[in-house]
Image (spheres, rainbow, N blue to C red):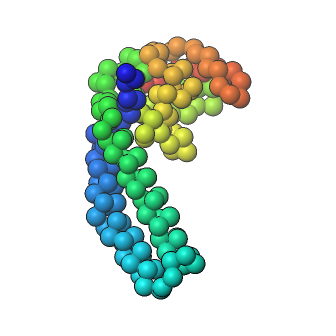
C-alpha cells in the first residue's frame, strides 16, 4: 500500500485552504448551479453553448474542491524553529552570491506556500534543499537546472 503524499504548510496556509473550501462549497457552487439552471431554460441542450460552459465550469469547480480536500487531508503542519543556528522551514536566510557579490533574503517554506517572486522558497526546490541544515558562514554549492551556483550563508533568522 502506498502512502499518501504529505503537503508541508503552516497553520495559516491550512486555514486559508479551509476558508477557500467553504467558499467554493457554498457560494461558488450555488453560483454555478444557477448558471446551469439558467442555461437549461434556453431550451435544447444539444446545441446550447451556455449549458456546455456552465457544465465545464462545474467540472472545474468539483476538481478544485477535490484538490483542496486532498491538500487539507494530507497537510503536515510545520512550525518555524526557534533555533536560528541551522536553516530549516520557517527560516529567513540571507545569502551572498559568491560570483556576483549580491545578497538576497529568502524565507524557507513548504511547497504549498512557495512564491519565488516574493522570495518564499520551497524546501523541496533545488535551492531550498541546498540551503537546508546549513549554518551561518557556510559556503554552499547548489546544482540547479541552469547550472551550479555558489553561495555563502550570511545570516539566519
Residue 27 on image: x %, y %: 31, 67
Q: Residue at x 40, y 23 (%)?
A: 2
Residue 69 on image: x %, y %: 33, 45
Considering depth in this image, is 91 or 145 the residue closer to the camera? 145
Q: Image height check: is 66 above or below 28?
A: above
Q: What is the quadrant of residue 78 in the picture? A: top left
Count the numbered circles shown.
0
Considering depth in this image, is 76 or 127 the residue closer to the camera? 76
Q: Does residue 38 appear in the picture of this structure? A: yes
Considering depth in this image, is 154 or 40 the residue closer to the camera? 40
Q: Residue at x 46, y 20 (%)?
A: 132
Q: Does residue 107 appear in the picture of this structure? A: no
Give the residue at the far bottom of this rendering.
Answer: 42
Residue 1 on image: x %, y %: 37, 21
**Left-right relation of 146 to 139:** right
Q: Residue at x 54, y 29 (%)?
A: 125
Considering depth in this image, is 25 or 100 the residue closer to the camera? 25
Residue 62 on image: x %, y %: 40, 56
Image quadrant in which the C terminus is located:
top left
**Left-right relation of 86 to 102:** left
Amino acid at each position: 500500500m502506498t502512502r499518501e503524499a504529505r503537503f508541508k504548510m503552516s497553520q495559516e496556509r491550512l486555514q486559508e485552504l479551509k476558508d477557500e473550501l467553504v467558499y467554493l462549497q457554498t457560494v461558488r457552487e450555488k453560483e454555478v448551479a444557477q448558471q446551469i439552471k439558467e442555461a437549461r431554460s434556453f431550451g435544447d441542450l444539444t446545441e446550447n453553448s451556455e449549458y456546455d460552459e456552465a457544465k465545464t465550469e462545474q467540472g472545474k469547480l468539483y476538481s478544485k474542491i477535490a484538490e483542496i480536500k486532498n491538500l487539507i487531508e494530507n497537510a503536515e503542519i510545520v512550525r518555524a524553529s526557534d533555533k536560528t543556528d541551522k536553516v530549516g522551514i520557517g527560516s529567513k536566510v540571507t545569502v551572498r552570491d559568491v560570483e556576483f557579490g549580491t545578497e538576497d533574503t529568502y524565507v524557507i517554506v513548504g511547497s504549498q506556500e512557495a512564491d519565488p517572486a516574493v522570495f518564499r522558497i520551497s524546501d523541496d526546490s533545488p535551492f531550498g534543499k541546498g540551503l537546508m541544515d546549513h549554518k551561518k558562514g557556510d559556503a554552499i554549492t547548489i546544482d540547479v537546472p541552469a547550472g551550479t551556483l555558489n553561495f555563502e550563508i550570511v545570516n539566519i533568522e
